[in-house]
Image (tube, coloured by chain):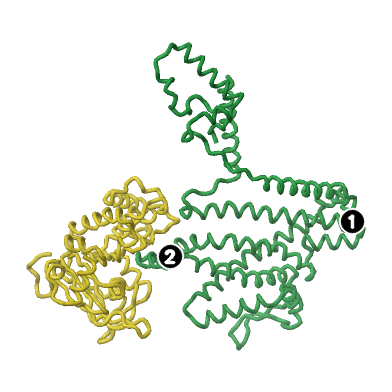
Amino acid sequence: MTEPSLSVSTPADRPPAAPADRRPEPQAEADRIEAERIEAERTEPQRTEARRPLSAQRVIPLRHPGRWIVTVVVLVLVAQFIHGLVSNPFYEWSRFQYWFLRPVIMNGLVITLEVTALSAVLGLVGGVLLAFARLSRSPILRAVSWTYVWLFRSVPLIVVLLILYNASALYKTLSLGVPFGPGFVHFNESSLATDMVVATLGLSLNEAAYASEVVRAGVLSVDQGQHEAAASLGLPKGYQFTRIVLPQALRAIVPAYVNQLIGLIKGTSLVFYVSLLDLFGEVQNMGSTYPSDIVPLLMVATVWYVILTSVVSIAQFYVERYYSRGALRTVPPTPLQKLRAAVRGLRGRLDVIKAVNG
Amino acid sequence: MSTTATTTEAVRPAAVEIHGAHKWYGTHQVLNGIDLTVQPGQVAVLLGPSGSGKSTLLRAVNHLEKLDIGHVSVSGELIGVRRQGERLKELSERTILAQRSRIGFVFQGFNLFPHLTVVDNITAAPVATKRKTKAEAREFALALLDRVGLADKADAYPRQLSGGQQQRVAIARALALEPGVILFDEPTSALDPELVGEVLAVIKDLATSGTTLIVVTHEIGFAREVADLVVFLDGGRIVEQGTPAEVLDNPQHPRTREFLSKVL
């Protein structure tokens, strides 16, 4: 904002109202009047403003005293909360510092990241396939997709994980071969189903069910006219989906899928129950070894999960911004752009004040 | 086309031929036996009250709607179906898409791709169907934009344009197919009155350049000025057809007279 505020109007933006300005006068006299006017405006801005004709006056914005009161109350509460966090000995921040970057915690963090990344990718691929099946014209594919989603949305994730964990008891070997006929290649389930595989599989199966609904909602959100236009141009089917429908669907998909992804990051904490030591698993483990450190250890887990979701949320902002091209007349500014604009505005205002004050 | 057609070479096929078109939505019959022939270079205007089947008929020409009975051919080629003995069999989706890429279609609601720039909207089809390289397609697109008076909007996004400008881009996008025939489905109905003129001017320019056009519209003045053939539909049938002078100025059928008295 380079607009001068109420009290610092420059000579240039005064309305050309005063007839005295236009009458030929000695330059010295004009300068004196102008200097007096600026001085008067500086010392008594309200009165000079009031002397202008009504049509040339700035509108005084409505004040919101209620907002100020609420702001103060909230700030006091926040300050109190932060003070409590820092000063309460219960949190043992020195122990937090000790644990935060310990190798054992880092190992857990790596497992969490691996499981999240694998399940996010596999879950999304599965979700896209399920969404396609659900949107297809084949009643069989539609029914299979619907049933899958119904089943995995019904069963709690922890139950899915534990069933898979114990599946080696149900299916001793896995075979590749003719359906219902002889198998050619046999796998021993227990060698195949490591803790990592069980955890990733369980999370992916669960994730796919939710992702398919997110993708389906996105595709349905694209206007029917877009499908028709793509069809009328004779665009090949694959091109229609990847270049016309999907980019528009992603505007609806991204926020919902990021929600899902954040749920997944936190959901990985359940893999502890299939004896995979992720971030939460290691924290739990260390907590039972060092019972006095359980609170700082939980704070370590909290802070790491907050960092992971923050990274995802920041990525979400930029991805959403990318896919809003064309949908909005102007894309929203990034935080960096906002900061730069604010600095520019402040500088502009300072320049105006300097100019007025000489 | 040479006039010395040999015995093996038939006369030039009609640009669009519709034979015995019937179509039902559930139990509601929208097309009830329509036969229509549009010659190359002709401008045909379809008139009629809403629900008369004119949009459905137009959409059947590029197989956006499937006919239940009857068939359509464009430049002598059956659309959406092939003939096997005495039966008509539906073509594969890929073949239908290839056929559509030779027929221009302009929608009432423009249906530009909002996430693509104007020039990318126009080059999408020629590039995706591998008919042109990216550079060739872009050059052609810029020439088309110049023709519709929007040379300076190549890199704008559709939502940054007015309705009239969007519809002109949509026309350029249809022209990029280098189509034998262009179909217009109420191209000016979604526009502010003051923007209608600029779109009609572009369509008139196409009409005089010898492209075959079929236009569904309520702009009677436009029909009178540009059409070679005016077709009046009601209840899924053609009530009467002929030159603008015949149908608009001297309608024979009372239903046509009644309709014209309301819209004129």
Quadrant in which the C terminus of chain A appears: top right
Residue A235: x %, y % from top left: 38, 65
Q: Which residue is mark 2?
A: A240
Residue A53: x %, y % from top left: 48, 32
Q: Residue at x 27, y 72 (%)?
A: B49
Judge the density around disc 2: few (<14), some (14-19), many (≥20) Cα neighbours within 10 Å: some
Tell which circle, 2 or 1, labels the residue nearer the N-terminal end. Answer: 2
Task: Quadrant for residue A212, please give it.
Answer: bottom right
The colour one sees for chain B in the rendered image is: yellow
Instruction: Identify which residue, A54 or A194, lies in the foreground.
Output: A54
Say if A96 sits above or below A225 in the image: above
Instruction: Identify which residue, B25 or A27, lies in the foreground.
Output: A27
Task: Quadrant for residue A163, please give it.
Answer: bottom right
* Direction from residue A311 to residue A358 in the image, left or right: left
Would residue B25 be visible to someone looking at this image? yes
Judge the density around disc 1: few (<14), some (14-19), many (≥20) Cα neighbours within 10 Å: some
Task: Quadrant for residue B200, please give it.
Answer: bottom left
Q: Which residue is mark 1?
A: A293
Q: Chain of mark 2?
A: A
Say if A214 sits above or below A189 in the image: above
| SS type, badge 1 | helix
Q: Amino acid at mark 2?
A: Gln
Q: Amino acid at mark 1?
A: Asp
Q: Residue at x 86, y 57 (%)?
A: A295
Chain that is coloured green in the picture: A
Instruction: Identify which residue, A227 or B176, lies in the foreground.
Output: A227
* Direction from residue A76 to residue B128 in the image, left or right: left
